[in-house]
Amino acid sequence: MKLSSVKNYRWQRTTGIVLLSIVALLLVIALYFDSFLEVDPLIQGDKTVLDTGWDLWEGDRLIESGITLPYTIQGLVDGKTFTLTTKLPDTFLFTHPSLFFETSMSSLDIRIDSESIYSFEGDTTPWKSPVLAGGFPHFVRIPDTATGHELSLVLSIYSDNPFAGNIDAPELGAKSDQVLHQLRELPSLAFGFIFLFTGLVSILVAIGLQSGEERRSVWHFGWLELALGMWVFTQNCSRIILFRNPVLPLNFSYVALFLLPFILIKYVNASYRIPERFSARFLTFSYLFLLGYVAGWAGQYFGWFTYADIILYAGGGLVLFIISLFIALIVDFIRGNRELVSFLLAVGVLLVTVVAEEALLLMKIELENATILHSGMTVCGIILLSHTAKIISRGRTNEIREKMLLNLAYTDSLTGVENRTAYEKRVQRSESLPHVLGIIMIDVNDLKPINDSLGHAVGDAVLKLTARTISESVPAGSELYRIGGDEFISFIPSVTEERLSQICDRFNSLVLSLPECRFTIACGSALFRTKGNRTIHEVIAEADEAMYRTKKEMKHNREPQRGLYR
């Protein structure tokens, strides 16, 4: 290395070290000055749970004092108004605290010393009152001056279902903390997106497939994933971060719950060969769920009851449906239907995760989200998708095999053009022929003398060469068939009589110009019009007669053909 290059390298390295040192020093100084700024962090972490010292009133009647939340009001609560009162702390942990409270099947009025600061009123007319259904989160700013004052929660309940009358403890804290705490279910939201995306993609793929077993399997798998996605997606924090009305997505939860049995049995029918008596019975049971959704809609619309009133029964029915189907298919598996192993494995994984979730609840171990259950649902979906992929692969293999068999059935094994069977099938579909169709009959002259003098191998070579030459010289879209030992017929669409005659004359000249051999062919042509007064068979007969006339003229105008010359 030259001395100047060494000096230049050392200068660059020294300059870089000096500049990086200055940047590091300025960063330390900036951190020092900025450390004097006092800004509340987004996550403050502190909260006050208002769970003790509550008094419960019904109107002016004190029901119970000194209760601890969560609490369940006993007896019938529909149409009644209850008031919970307690004293706010003498000091708040920080300024402008937010009160987080979740209601179910009730309106809410929050008061400080009997003065309302927040109101969520449900309309009591049919259909509107169910807006109060589900877990409805409320975030309410509490004035700093409210310390030590009386807090009242006024609940007007609109149902007697198992969810009504359950009261959770309110929390005082930063609204950002409370919202972020709701986002503990963010993994479930991701699972919901995955299910929805997989379902939509599967349905689009099914639309692009031809009708058959594979299309039905992909189609019903897509709807199964879509139903699971609607259920998972709308049961988590999507209710407060994606929807202005957090109860609106619950409609998708309800319809998914009632649709799942029907979609599940349709998927099983499309993807597995199960006894018809099994599928018919379970399909009938699934109709009861669909009727249940219709009944729930009518009950909610006319104010008789709501979906929330029958949700537990529907959920229990769904569990019994899946377990019954699982047991029935186990019996069929034992009897020899080994194809069911993937479905039994998928449902087995799902049931294990459900049992695991329930076991944790019994042990009073509360999870931040339903990741275990949703992971089980994901594994279940992957197993079913793999089975559906096998069905698609099997369908493609069968399709290729069928095409190969059809190709063998309709292809002449010697020349490679279509055979007489394909020709007859094509003529039968004369309604699909072009409006104008040129027909050329071709016959190889003196094939028998060629076979007798030079052997059948040479005769076969003549036929192959004839088929190849004609195939390469006819216009695009034309068809060529070998219909006899030395006879061919070509269909040429949208051609004039003059052009047809030129093509016919050109065939023989092309054969004679081949360097490999020297033999002749005879051609005859005719023009078929679909709107004419002659049938396709009559026009073919005309072309055949023209070919024989040409053949006869060729024999009278030349010496007898001596065979094939190389």
Image (cartoon, rainbow, N blue to C red):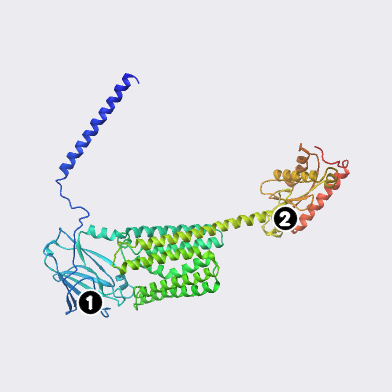
Residue 82 in sight: yes
Say whether residue 387 is left or right of residue 48: right
Q: CA distance from mark 1 to mark 2?
A: 85 Å
Say whether residue 165 is left or right of residue 457: left
Give the tally of numbered discs.
2
Mark 1 vs mark 2: which is more N-terminal?
1
406 is higher (above) or lower (below) than 109: above
Q: Which mark is residue 92?
A: none
- The residue under label 1 is which amino acid type? Thr
Q: Nearer the viewer, residue 176 or 441?
A: 176
Quadrant of image for the C terminus: top right
Are dots 1 and 2 in contact, CB under 8 Å?
no
Say whether residue 491 is left or right of residue 367: right
Say whether residue 374 is left or right of residue 514: left
Give the percent coordinates (x, y) of residue 177. 23, 58
- Residue at 28% x, 28% y is 13
Quadrant of image for the N terminus: top left
Give the percent coordinates (x, y) of residue 515. 76, 36
Q: Which mark is residue 423?
A: 2
- Residue at 44% x, 66% y is 347
Give the percent coordinates (x, y) of residue 153. 20, 71
Give the percent coordinates (x, y) of residue 361. 31, 68
- Residue at 36% x, 62% y is 372
Q: Which quadrant of the view contains residue 510? A: top right
Q: Which quadrant of the view contains residue 426? A: bottom right
Q: Secondary structure at mark 1?
A: strand
Q: Which mark is residue 81?
A: 1
- The residue under label 2 is which amino acid type? Tyr
Q: Check disc 1: other Cα within 10 Å, few if <14, some if 14-19, many if 20+.
A: some
Q: Nearer the viewer, residue 554 or 70?
A: 70
